[in-house]
Amino acid sequence: MRLAVIGAGAVGRSVVELAGEYGHEVVAVADSSSAVVADGTGGRGSGAGGDDAVGVDPDAVVARKAERGIVGDDDPEDALAADYEALVEATPTTLGDAEPGFSHVRTALERDRHAVLANKGPVAERFGDLRAAVDDSDGGIRFEATVGGAIPAVSTVEDIEPGHVTAVRGVLNGTANFILTRMAAEGLDYDHVLAEAQDLGVAEADPSFDVDGTDAALKCVILANVLSFGAVDDPADAREFTLDDADVEGIRDVPGSALRLAAEDGRTVRLIGEATGETVRVAPRLVPENGTLAVSGTQNIVQIETSHAGRLNISGRGAGGPETASAVLGDVGRLE
Amino acid sequence: MRLAVIGAGAVGRSVVELAGEYGHEVVAVADSSSAVVADGTGGRGSGAGGDDAVGVDPDAVVARKAERGIVGDDDPEDALAADYEALVEATPTTLGDAEPGFSHVRTALERDRHAVLANKGPVAERFGDLRAAVDDSDGGIRFEATVGGAIPAVSTVEDIEPGHVTAVRGVLNGTANFILTRMAAEGLDYDHVLAEAQDLGVAEADPSFDVDGTDAALKCVILANVLSFGAVDDPADAREFTLDDADVEGIRDVPGSALRLAAEDGRTVRLIGEATGETVRVAPRLVPENGTLAVSGTQNIVQIETSHAGRLNISGRGAGGPETASAVLGDVGRLE
């Protein structure tokens, strides 16, 4: 399909770079202040091109962003108006009205195009509005990349059918998990390990989104929406969840002593999020040290409780440009 | 959809019992010598019935099989000729020509109906013939239940796109895994634990299919076929795998001493199967004692190596009537 990639951070750039391997082409890319739109004749503006390709030159776009901080000489609006079949929404997650991401998706749907989200904001905070926009459109939406990175959490829950899923829980934030893993492994305290994580690029300069549990909570809210809307025939009967509905506790107050005490009992501490069709909770929990939920480092795990097939566990890389891009491009394939 | 369930063992009976919960109805059931076909008017032959149901009475069928060893007074051919939309092939796995299962599936496809297999035989031994039959039919086939029970192994590999999957490996036989787990946990030898497994119904009176690795090998052959055929556009270019292509070693010769030695090094032994687009191997292997592949008891795990998203691990219940039936009924939903 022809893709417009909105957002040129790690995920957006990886989608631009990998799209060709999945049989798709990128016809437009936008960041917050600029855009590049392929002109459809094989020309690619500045840079190489030719043959009968109609997309942008992925390497040139990524290089331009790295060197000049922009993706091209067009305006972001030009990307939204381009001739794409699916829009990829990969701008930073925002809460509340989830703008400008929500409007990007709505624009695509109003034009009867598809939208694939890596941005959690619209899916967590405005799920009902998204559903309504889809109902009025010939286009569809998918959002695998919003939960669990490379782990196919959303599509697996959908495949089992949400009516047959009683709960979904897991380790959904790699930054918090890395910190807890290192605290347990080295007997170090939180501040020390946070600094290490920041040096490694695993935690951001402002790590609050990750360590306060907000990121994990947004992912659980999204799962709760999938379970809730999936269990009813009429969307009007579904309960809609937002971040405000989540009961959230992060890892800032987990002392090193708690981990040492846990280890004496063969346990450790992990930040566990859980969603049912009725509740969303994120909190540090004791788990068996060698058990399924005690994934290490930046790994994620999603545990699905089913009505007839027991418990399913899916673990893998929770984040990263290529990992998240593969989830986005997988969704594009599902929409074809 | 309207289903014909061919095979009234544990899986067939569970499909009959659970179909209603998934929104499907069973219009015919057959075992090797008998059948029951709903007459379509709401009558259900002997037993309760009424209202406007057109399917068989699940409880009556299961009870009749338990008490009399047959499912009804019709002939198996009547079930194959019934007015179903999807045929469920749940007869015992047979090798070589994979009959009669292969013919049951071919009959459904020739009638432009769908077929869902729990029977590994046709998918492992005659994948090319199955593909050809599907190409000539308006019906499709799915076979999630043939690999990993409740674990959505096949659909997850399909979703990632086989071209982006480099290998699939795992613990795919719960009987062998249970035996190895108990040998390691209790320091007992193979014959002792096999007897325990047979008492528990985890191993059959003739356990060779499981302990010689044949069952795991068939599952890996199926995965190799999925990878091989999925990586090419023209099926004529795909390499077809059968059980003969698999390099198989079972667990009969794993001595208790090997497990004790492994434990001193923080390892244990598991029967690991691996499939790529080129090879199929099953053998006992040393794995880290608390690592991902060291699932316990009758659990299964499937580990998928991907090109862009690292390694995905999916674990869960590998076998059982309801577990396998949920995989079958999930496939029916995907074919709708």
Image: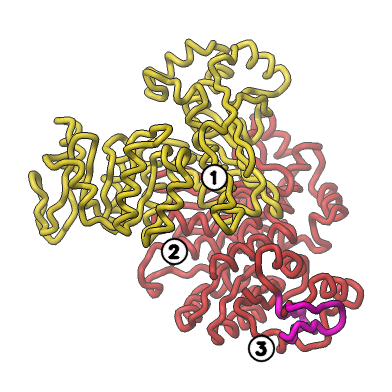
Chain colours: A red, B yellow
Which residue occupies 73% across, 59% down?
A322
Nearest the camera: B251 or B221?
B221
Q: Is residue A27 magenta?
A: yes
Tell me: B61 left or right of A63. left
How many marks can you see?
3
User: Compared to A143, does B306 lie above or below?
Assistant: above
* Callout 1 crowding tier (Cα within 10 Å): few <14, some 14–19, many ≥20: many
User: Compared to A205, does B177 lie above or below?
Assistant: above
* Callout 3 crowding tier (Cα within 10 Å): few <14, some 14–19, many ≥20: some
Which residue occupies 61% across, 60% down?
A147
Mark linked to residue A228: 2
Nearest the camera: A179 or B150?
B150
Q: CA distance from mark 1 to mark 3?
A: 43 Å
Mark 1 belongs to which amino acid?
A: Asn
Q: Quadrant of residue B6?
A: top left
* Callout 2 crowding tier (Cα within 10 Å): few <14, some 14–19, many ≥20: many
Which callout, 1 or 3, points to the residue nearer the camera?
1
Question: Is disc 1 in contact with disc 3, using a CB cutoff of under 8 Å?
Answer: no
